[in-house]
Amino acid sequence: MGLVIIFALVAILGLAATLRAFKDKNILAILFAGGSTVVFGWFAIMTVVNNGFPTLVH
């Protein structure tokens, strides 16, 4: 279930990049960072819905 954690971290970093791109008014960066935020965020949400929340105990 580490995949959910990785997807969520990438989505959070993409959100930070999207906000920075808005600040710099960089349209191409807004498209790519926003797209990666949406895609990886959706993957993280759907992985949690499908497989459940990752447990930290082995």
Image: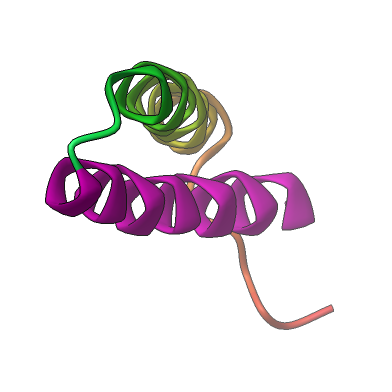
Is residue 13 left or right of 31 when viewed as pictured? right
Q: In this view of the protein, which residue sits in the foreground, 46 or 9?
A: 9
Residue 41 colored in magenta in the image = no
Residue 10 colored in magenta in the image = yes
Q: Could you tell me residue 35's position as x and y percent?
A: 40, 18
Task: Count the numbered circles shown.
Answer: 0
Q: Could you tell me residue 17's position as x and y percent?
A: 39, 51
Q: Could you tell me residue 54's position as x and y percent?
A: 60, 59
Q: Is residue 53 above or below residue 26?
A: below
The residue sitting at 61% across, 58% down in the picture is 5
Q: Residue furthest bottom?
A: 57
The residue sitting at 60% across, 44% down in the picture is 7
Q: Quarter-wise, where is residue 55 in the image?
A: bottom right
The residue sitting at 49% across, 26% down in the picture is 36
Q: Is residue 21 above or below residue 46?
A: below
Task: Read off the magenta span.
Answer: 1-24
Q: In this view of the protein, which residue sits in the foreground, 35 or 57?
A: 35
Q: Could you tell me residue 25's position as x and y percent?
A: 18, 37
Q: Residue furthest right?
A: 58
Predominant SS of the magenta segment: helix
